[in-house]
Amino acid sequence: MAQAHTPKFKNPVVNWIDSRLPIFTMLDHEYNQYPMPRNVNYLWAFGAIAMVMLIVMILTGLFLAMQYAANTQVAFESVERIMRDVNYGWLLRYVHANGASMFFIAVYIHMFRGLYYGSYKAPREILWILGVIILLVMMATGFMGYVLPWGQMSFWGATVITNLFSAFPIIGDPIVTWLWGGFSVDNPTLNRFFALHFLLPFVLFALVILHTAALHVSGSNNPLGIDPKGPQDTVPFNPYVTIKDGFAVVVFFIFFAAFVFFAPNYLGHPDNYIPANPLVTPAHIVPEWYFLPFYAILRAIPDKLGGVLAMFGAIAVLAVLPWLDTSKVRSTKFRPIYRIFFWLLALDALLLGYAGAMPAEGLWLWLARLGTAYYFFHFLILLPVLGKLERPLPLPASISEAVLKPKEKA
Amino acid sequence: MRALKSAILSAAFALGLAGAAQAAEGVHIPSQDWSHDGVFGTIDKPSAQRGFQVYKEVCAACHSMHLVPIRTLAGIGFTEDELKALAAGYEVQAGPNDEGEMFMRPGIPADRFPSPFPNDNAARASNGGALPPDLSLMAKARVGGENYIYAFLTGFEDPPEGVNLMPGMNYNKYFPGHQVGMPNVLVPDGVTYSDGTAATVEQQAHDVSVFLTFAAEPHLDARKQMGVKVILFLIVLAGLMYAVKRRLWSTIH
């Protein structure tokens, strides 16, 4: 076997290593030669952007963890020390706090891209499911990270969210006590949340590697949703997609920097600059913006257990999406009726997000209920039925034909 | 005319109260002009220095600011000698000494601003049961930020007809719920500014809001200045990358 391997790198050291551990061959194969459909648009850059954001979060988080103290007596003050006295501590913390929002923005766009172009359909089901698991782990990580500054929203957010588990009959209350490590959100809770908040990003990293590995088996989807038929339909990943993704990352960083430097607290809540106080409940307990659509679903159901199940169901339904959508056509470009409902779902997500930020009463409660009903209708009823009824537009014969034809006319 | 005006005002307040009852934080906080607004904004240092004087002579009687070290004031133009002199004016508890006793010593710039009360219970006992909140982060800890501080400090007035204040409470049109333990503390010429600025209530409220913005975010100026450089750099980098991308992709079409 070893003899079968012919040296292909100019650097003899690289060759020596590669013939014993073929990491360079693997990298060359996956990130240099990897054939990318030539017609992908900039929406395909959000996977790379999300990956870069994960690395930004791990690096800033590592240095914050060196200064932060996970103890209810000093946590709030240690964050203020980072903001005031640690060299560029304010920059680290604002990059990390806003980075969480940016990570979610990138991932949500990445998911809606997958929804629009049918990237979840065969043979990419496991790729998509890994993505849903990544979202779940991200949510857990983001939630626990928000608890660490130990402000009012940290404390009360943690109380509300952990209390959700008490909705389950019999096992509910013991689970909550076990999560807290006591009989209320307190120092043991903060300690374990810090430990988990440090651990989960590395779990995320491993999941992202699996996600990428699964992607490189099936290959990337593209705006037409048809498989590449040969080299004329693809470009090598490097340099064509590296430069395109790199450009997109830099543009995204401009957006990111605008928040970090000019509106660093815009996405946060003022109450989190008040130290946690178990005796004073804030007027409105609202989670971070990226949880708002799910928070709206939780509150839309009048029953506590029902609300919790609906909220988790909203994510679970995504995991089985590859089998709910019965249409064989991937790209929404060729599904004129589904296209309308796709945008309706996007509007629905925005409506739920807005309703989640409003007090759960009156008009907003009813809009949240309407939004929740549509969300589940869309996935559970519309997608299976529409796939059977809809007559898709004719698909082009190949990517190169579809891409190059208009050019020849021009 | 005056009767008409007060009738309109009280109707507006009744509506305002109904709104507040509905949304709890429904009062509109008017925005002021701040020199630190916007991309190129910086803290108005003379104003922040005057604001510190208001804090020291008025607010600090009841409010702590225990997250802010005295040396932070270097950021609004205090020299090292001024900081040492200022700090020495405070008595700070230190110890225990070799005999195991706590003792008082003059402050140094590295000390944080001493709190007026030894603990929250003492603060409540001296303030009719109400706890004066710590001011270190006030400009970031309220919806509206420094605009809220300004509005609150200028928002004390007689309660509208039909509103019964609880004993010891004061009416403030911008405070959520309108009844607040803190009395109106800013009076014209309540402080004497050394730079000759007329100490109107509005001027004092403005200055102390600027100071508290600085106290909550001492690196505000550095942050905005770095942001301008970072974004300019990113725009140039994005332009270069776009040019390279165009050139590369033009070879395959």
Image (cartoon, coloured by chain):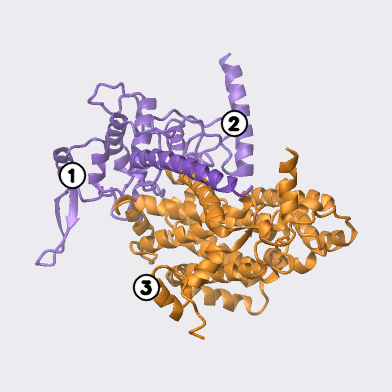
Q: Chain of mark 1?
A: B
The answer to which of A114 and A310 lies nearer the viewer is A114
Q: How many marks?
A: 3
Quarter assignment of residue B183 = top left
Estimate the x, y position of residue B115 in percent, counting from the top left: 28, 49
Amino acid under disc 2: Phe
Quarter of the image with the C terminus of chain A is top right
For residue A282, above or below residue A213: above
Q: Chain of mark 2?
A: B
- Residue A162 located left or right of residue A94: right
Amino acid under disc 1: Ala
Residue that mark 3 sits on: A13
Sequence-earlier tag: 2 or 1? 2
How far apart are the alpha carbons under marks 2 and 1?
A: 45 Å
Residue that mark 2 sits on: B13
Q: Chain of mark 3?
A: A
**Chain A hue?**
orange
Estimate the x, y position of residue A230 in percent, counting from the top left: 69, 62
Whether labels 3 and 2 belong to a single chain: the reply is: no
Secondary structure beneath disc 3? helix
For residue A208, above or below residue B215: below
Estimate the x, y position of residue B24 in percent, counting from the top left: 58, 44
- Residue A334 located left or right of residue A152: right
Q: Residue sitting at 65 percent across and 51 percent down?
A: A353
Residue that mark 1 sits on: B87
Judging from the image, what is the letter of the chain drawn in purple? B
Secondary structure beneath disc 1? helix
Residue B67 visible, this orientation: no
How far apart are the alpha carbons under marks 3 and 2?
A: 80 Å
The answer to which of A184 and A153 lies nearer the viewer is A153
